[in-house]
């Protein structure tokens, strides 16, 4: 789940109320697992790793908002060991989702929480945000042959983390190159590809929107999300496309020629 507390409008009890509702609905009532990004970056990914700071799984706060920090501190929450893109989770598969993140040199690879979300047939949920700042999009870079060099020349970069017992653990990470991300979907000038891909997900990924507070929320199957990204990549369409490139793409209602029910398992 990705979220923006400020865009939801007034909520009595603020982040604690949202976190409690998510826990009640997802974990307690459905016996399912809730996971949130608890990323810890100062500037970009490469700059954070090169700075040499030490990520402490137990103490380093989430940098992705009040809701995620509240969930990180919940009793029973577990967190992946990662210097920039840690994930906190609650529920029956929380340990499995997070346990191997530090062993995957690719932050969004097969044994990362993002790769395992696909394996588990999970969902990606957005509260008060659009589909720009959703880190799940990077899975297609780490789980397939990606046509754009998105990592720095000195990757993987080593960083020191402290695990749940306070032990120092060296973690090696492929770091995104800021030179490759100027027009990326989450950037201010990424509006064209953001709008285009959102329409693709709506038409072929069963992306659904709902009203929440003063904003909206959306939900999409992680597997369908990934399959759309992979098929778009095969057609030369990625989250790094410029506005001029987007203008030359086929309409988002017809760019994928396979119906969603036939998407790969």
Image (cartoon, rainbow, N blue to C red):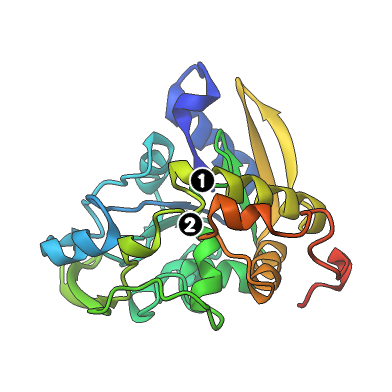
> Label 1's element?
strand
In primary-sequence order, the first of circles 1 and 2 is 1
At a point 48% along the width and 57% down the height, the residue shown is 135
Q: Residue furthest bottom?
A: 145
Q: Residue furthest left?
A: 52
Comparing 27 with 97, the one in front is: 97
Q: Which residue is mark 2?
A: 135
Image coordinates of residue 146 in percent, x first then y, are 52, 78
Comparing 177 with 29, the one in front is: 177
Disc 2 crowd rating (10 Å Cα; few below 14, some 14-19, many 20+) is: some
Image coordinates of residue 209 in percent, x first then y, are 73, 38
Which quadrant would residue 87 be assigned to in this image?
Answer: bottom left
Drawn side of residue 203 relative to residue 174, left or right: right
Q: Is residue 28 visible?
A: no
At a point 79% along the width and 62% down the height, the residue shown is 255
At a point 54% along the width and 83% down the height, the residue shown is 145
Image coordinates of residue 259 in percent, x first then y, are 88, 66
Q: Is residue 138 visible?
A: yes
At a point 36% along the width and 42% down the height, the residue shown is 69
For the residues bearing labels 1 and 2, Cβ distance under 8 angstroms: yes
- As drawn, 35 above or below 118: above
Q: Which residue is mark 1?
A: 2
């Amino acid at each position: 789940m990705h979220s923006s507390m400020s865009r939801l409008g007034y909520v009595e009890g603020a982040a604690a109320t949202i976190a409690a509702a998510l826990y009640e609905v997802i974990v307690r009532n459905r016996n399912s697992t809730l996971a949130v990004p608890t990323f810890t970056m100062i500037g970009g990914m490469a700059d954070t790793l090169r700075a040499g700071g030490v990520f402490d799984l137990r103490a380093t706060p989430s940098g992705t908002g009040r809701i995620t920090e509240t969930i990180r501190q919940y009793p029973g929450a577990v967190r992946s060991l990662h210097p920039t893109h840690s994930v906190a989770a609650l529920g029956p598969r929380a340990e499995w989702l997070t346990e191997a993140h530090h062993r995957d040199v690719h932050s969004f690879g097969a044994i990362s929480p993002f790769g395992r979300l696909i394996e588990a047939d999970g969902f990606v949920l957005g509260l008060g945000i659009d589909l720009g700042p959703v880190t799940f999009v990077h899975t297609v870079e780490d789980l397939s042959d990606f046509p754009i060099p998105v990592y720095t020349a000195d990757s993987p970069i080593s960083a020191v983390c402290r695990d749940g017992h306070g032990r120092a653990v060296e973690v090696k990470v492929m770091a995104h190159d800021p030179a490759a991300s100027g027009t990326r979907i989450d950037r201010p000038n990424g509006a064209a590809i953001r709008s285009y891909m959102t329409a693709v997900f709506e038409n072929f990924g069963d992306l659904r929107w709902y009203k929440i507070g003063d904003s909206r929320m959306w939900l999409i199957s992680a597997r369908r999300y990934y399959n759309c990204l992979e098929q778009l990549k095969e057609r030369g369409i990625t989250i790094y496309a410029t506005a001029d490139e987007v203008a030359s793409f086929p309409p988002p209602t017809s760019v994928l020629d396979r119906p969603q029910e036939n998407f790969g398992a």
